[in-house]
Image (cartoon, helix red, strand yellow):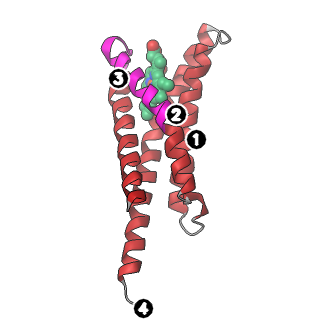
Amino acid sequence: MMKMFVDRLLLLSLMLVVLALLATSAATLWGEALGGSTLMLHMTAGGALVVGMPLVALWFLRRGVIRQAANAMLRCGYWLTILTATATIITVFLCMLPLPSTDQMNELMELHGYAGFAMVPAVALFSLAVVRSRRMKLTRSATPG
Ligand code: HEM
């Protein structure tokens, strides 16, 4: 019961953070630049994702999502979420190192945008798969025989 509560809490928090990141960066889709308080909010939500994502990844790993051989949707959603989140975070991190040129930074930011937008369907797929697998388990345990 407690574990299911933590599942829900983590998924809800992940969805809210990703929605905040999407909402604060959506204007770039129609050519506007990120700036001012929108950028501040974007980076605050970004910080929350950097801290929260390892927790989500480790929690669901311990819950055995990747051992669900029969549940491809769950495993796929989990790995796509990890992959897109890692790419989203690493592209920002690389920009903070004194290594890339300005052009390379612009390219990294473009990649960051693609990885970030790809994270939205990945998190949606993962959340849907968790809810679906729980419903299947509940239906099974409620069925006699
Ligand atoms: C769902 C996740 C995310 C989405 C959809 C997203 C989207 C975007 C987009 C579209 C841009 C503009 C890129 C460009 O200028 O071409 C951007 C910039 C940026 N994002 Fe994200 N992002 C996400 C997560 C994050 C995270 C986790 C961080 C922090 C670790 C972060 C920090 C930044 C920063 C610092 C910028 C640069 C703003 C600037 O150009 O001055 N974002 N993001």
**Residue that badge 3 annotates:** 30
The reply to whether dot 1 and dot 4 touch (C-beta < 8 Å) is no
Q: Which one is earlier in the sequence, the residue at label 2 or at label 1?
A: 1
- Amino acid on which disc 2 is placed: Ala
Q: Nearer the viewer, mark 4 or mark 3?
A: 4
Describe the element under mark 4 as helix, strand or loop.
loop
Classified by dominant secondary structure, the portion drawn in magenta counts as helix
Can residue 39 be seen? yes
Q: Work out how far the residue at label 3 is from the one at label 2, CA to CA, in angstroms.
A: 18 Å
Q: Which residues are magenta?
A: 31-52
The residue that mark 1 highlights is 83
Badge 2 is on which residue? 115
Rendering coords of residue 108 (x, y %): 58, 21
**Mark 4 — residue?**
145
Q: Position of residue 59 (x, y in %)?
A: 52, 50
Amino acid type, callout 4: Gly
